Amino acid sequence: MTAPGAGPAAVADDPDGDGARQDGGDGSEPATVRGRAASRDPTEHRSRASQSFWTLVVGVPAVFSVLRLGVEAGGELQTTLLLVANVGPVNLAAALFTTAARLVSAGLVAIFAIGAVLAVASEHAPNHWIGRHPPLFARWRENTPAWVVVASFGVALATWPILYLPLLLPAAAAAFQFHPTSLDERRVPRLALLAALLTAYALLLLPTLREAWGQREFFPVLAFAAPPLLALFVSGSIPAAVARPLALVTQVTVLGMLAWTALPVITTPVLPLTVTTVQDGAGGTEDIRGHVITVDDASTVILQERGGVRYVPVDRVESQVLCPTEEELPRHRLRVRDFHVEDSLLEGLGRRIRPIKRVDAACRTATDGG
């Protein structure tokens, strides 16, 4: 006997009469249908994209911290354990932030800018994407709160070298989908506002551009002049035929560049570089170039720049000076309104408060003493 309410259509849908196997026996929809619906659930995909994004943001710095200590120790287990015991998490986090903030903010800015462009393209041509889902960067951009995007640009503005700050203009235009029509819908006022903004930008950088051109520094000229013009054309939708390969190429490129540029972050010392002058056994002095790990009542522990740990009795230490690394020495002789182009805004403000002193002679002549 057919169950009440079951018509011919129900029988046709269940030719084997095994309704329990098809619908679970409780009147719910079939499990296969539920599985397909779950796989197409946009909420689930947004949740997964959000989890992968925050895993990247939180996990990568933690991995870098561990790798930095291992590299700093020269790969020696005992030296690594010594660093772990004496480098506190706060100091490690501060050292990591000062060196990795540029890398992390650059990665986030690139992800948000590319993701916004791909998100607009996926909205106009959703059926052209593999798997019928927007690219990974597009999902990350859509599921990231606006304050995180703004904070990423803020960190980049404060920590990037001034030479690369103009790149934030096209990146912001892409990430927030800012178009010249956003200034004003009317043509004449819009052109007037654009002309005023470009003129102000040119007046700000004109002395630097002249100096760079006179020194045949063509890269700074391009870095300062091209981004404002590029910012006028990066927003809006792009053809699906271009967006599909662009999604694959840009995502792989950005992740690959982040992995490649992470090498300097991992190899940057956690401890400051110093030259310690100590008395030797013959009545003279010796300069030890390295990083002071810890100081106690008995000895000063120094991780030498060329490897190895040196224990120096505190009563033999005469003086210590702080030295810059080779990476901190300037490569360009250009300034933007008294700010060196290789300094960030924070570094430039700091140098105004505490001007750079002449490098101590010990920093140029010291050796590791071993």
Image (cartoon, rainbow, N blue to C red):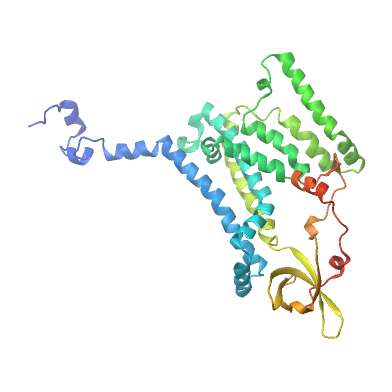
The residue at the point 82 percent across, 51 percent down is 354
Nearest the eye: 224 or 364: 364
Q: Is residue 276 left or right of residue 54?
A: right
Q: Is residue 106 left or right of residue 22?
A: right
Nearest the eye: 170 or 87: 87
Q: Is residue 67 above or below residue 81?
A: above
> x, y (%) of residue 197?
77, 26
Residue 22 in view (yes/no): yes
Q: Is residue 199 above or below residue 317?
A: above
Split into 4 quadrants, where in the image is the N terminus?
top left
Residue 246 in view (yes/no): no
> x, y (%) of residue 13?
21, 32
* Residue 362, image quadrant: bottom right
* Residue 288, image quadrant: bottom right
Number of numbered discs visible in the structure rendering = 0
Q: Residue furthest bottom?
A: 282
> x, y (%) of residue 228?
75, 31
Q: Residue furthest right?
A: 214
Nearest the eye: 168 or 273: 273
Q: Is residue 138 above or below residue 190?
A: below
> x, y (%) of residue 240?
56, 30
Q: Residue furthest left?
A: 1
* Residue 209, image quadrant: top right
Split into 4 quadrants, where in the image is the C terminus?
bottom right
Nearest the eye: 29 or 185: 185
Q: Is residue 352 left or right of residue 42?
A: right
The residue at the point 59 percent across, 46 percent down is 252
The residue at the point 46 percent across, 43 percent down is 48
